[in-house]
Amino acid sequence: MKTTARIVRVDRTTIYTGINALDHLRVACNPFLFGKNLVFLLTDRNTYKHCLPRLLESNPWLEKSILLTVDAGESTKTLQTVARLWMEMLSHQAGRDSLMITLGGGMITDLGGFVAGGYKRGIPCIHIPTTLLAQVDAAIGGKTAVNMEGVKNQAGFFFLPETVIADPCFLTTLPPRHLKSGLAEIIKTTLTGNALLWKKLKNKNVEELLLLPPESPFWQHLINGAITYKNRIVRNDFTEKGNRSILNFGHTIGHAIESFSQTEEANTLLHGEAVAAGMTGAVWLSSKKTGLPPDERDQIAGFLYKGYGPFSFSHADIPSLVDKMAHDKKKHNSEIRFTLISNPGSPRINMSCQPDEIAQALDFCLRF
Ligand SMILES: NC(=O)c1ccc[n+]([C@@H]2O[C@H](COP(=O)([O-])OP(=O)(O)OC[C@H]3O[C@@H](n4cnc5c(N)ncnc54)[C@H](O)[C@@H]3O)[C@@H](O)[C@H]2O)c1
């Protein structure tokens, strides 16, 4: 089979993206396959059903691996699950020469990275992300995490995978709502780091993009661009002391809206859906604080609203949302700090905003 995957190398991690990227898995595993070492393959119940057959078809040698399968969903990303998986690995007498392969969305890459990074002080890990969000974001950059007491990502550490294999074949079974959620993170990367790509993107609309097959050249261009961009930022600021916070564009408001939505089960938002609302608020703040021209602001907000609106909060919710942000981790000495843009492709980090400005930004999100 002809391989068309692209290879990106960042420090220790090699990333294969594109059609037939899976063909590189065996070679990527080779340095870790010797003697009697064990290969663990972590899936959730959905990726077990939808993605494992495709993986085994292209890599039948993985039939011999030890399957670790967990329930799908955010409520599985806990220390209890980690402990259960460690116990299971111990029961197989897994040593430090074992290999962990994850097959799943961001929940699985976060959990699997944590399990691999903590088992006997770290065993090598290879991510095969199967959602768009995980391909362009969660699997890249070495952040692992589990939730505690229902609060997201409270425990975790930085642990780089050896290899990431982002093959679009998995995206064909992904529910469209999840594809759209991942697209929001791609939009973020164009707004903060790639004005040219944003220009191409804004000539389409979100629904039109979702009709294109994930293996189409346009999607591959978007996915490769987003991965390369995140890599570049992570390489220069691995532990998020500075520029890595560019990646938080839309996330300060987005996280507040996301956790707010979790109080009403019927309306729980996906991460990207909340980030789309967050970016709409952030462009309003950008026009006020960092000189984003009003016509750019309105174009970006219009694009986001058409794709992701109407946003799922009301005027009455604004004070609680601002309050939530004040307790967010981005609070520094009573200021709430944002990543904003002065133009598409020109990010500005650590921009302090007042509660009344944030309230106006949220009001702007509801004005359409
Ligand atoms: N570490 C990071 O840098 C980082 C960045 C962003 C998000 N995250 C984390 O990522 C998680 C969200 O990731 P997600 O949106 O991928 O969610 P997810 O992993 O929960 O996957 C979404 C749903 O799609 C299913 N699924 C996965 N792949 C599929 C496929 N190919 N076909 C059919 N169904 C499939 C899953 O079983 C699940 O039900 C959160 O836990 C978030 O905290 C981490």
Image: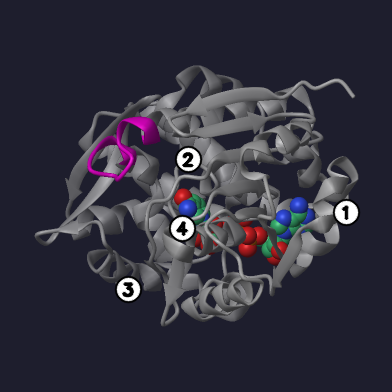
Q: Name the residue under label 3.
A: 320
Q: Quadrant of residue 45?
A: bottom right
Q: Could you tell me if residue 274 is visible in this image?
A: no
Q: Which comes before the other along the chain, label 3 or label 4?
A: 4
Q: In the shown orientation, is residue 350 left or right of residue 143?
A: left
Q: CA gap, disc 3 to disc 2?
A: 23 Å
- Mark sitting on residue 301: 2
Q: Which comes before the other along the chain, label 3 or label 2?
A: 2
Depth check, mark 3 against mark 1: the one in front is 1
The residue lying toward the viewer, choosing from 98 and 338, is 98
Depth check, mark 3 against mark 4: the one in front is 4
Determine the secondary structure under disc 1.
helix
Q: In the shown orientation, is residue 306 left or right of residue 198?
A: right
Q: Residue 230 appears at what percent x and percent y? A: 46, 34
Q: What's the residue type where badge 4 is placed?
A: Gly
How packed mark 2 is, by other alpha carbons closer than 10 Å (few <14, some 14-19, many 20 or more), is many
Q: Which comes before the other along the chain, label 2 or label 1?
A: 1
Q: CA gap, disc 2 to disc 1?
A: 41 Å
Residues at marks 1 and 4 touching, judged by CB atoms closer than 8 Å: no
Residues at marks 3 and 4 touching, judged by CB atoms closer than 8 Å: no
- Against 15, residue 367 (above or below) is below
Q: Mark 4 points at which residue?
A: 117
Determine the secondary structure under disc 3.
helix
Q: Name the residue under label 1.
A: 53
Q: What's the residue type where badge 3 is placed?
A: Ser
Placement of the N terminus among the 4 image quadrants: top right
Q: What's the residue type where badge 2 is placed?
A: Ala
Give me the residue at 81% from left, 40% from top.
169
Q: Which comes before the other along the chain, label 2 or label 4?
A: 4
How packed mark 1 is, by other alpha carbons closer than 10 Å (few <14, some 14-19, many 20 or more), is few
Residue span colored magenta: 234-244
How packed mark 3 is, by other alpha carbons closer than 10 Å (few <14, some 14-19, many 20 or more), is some
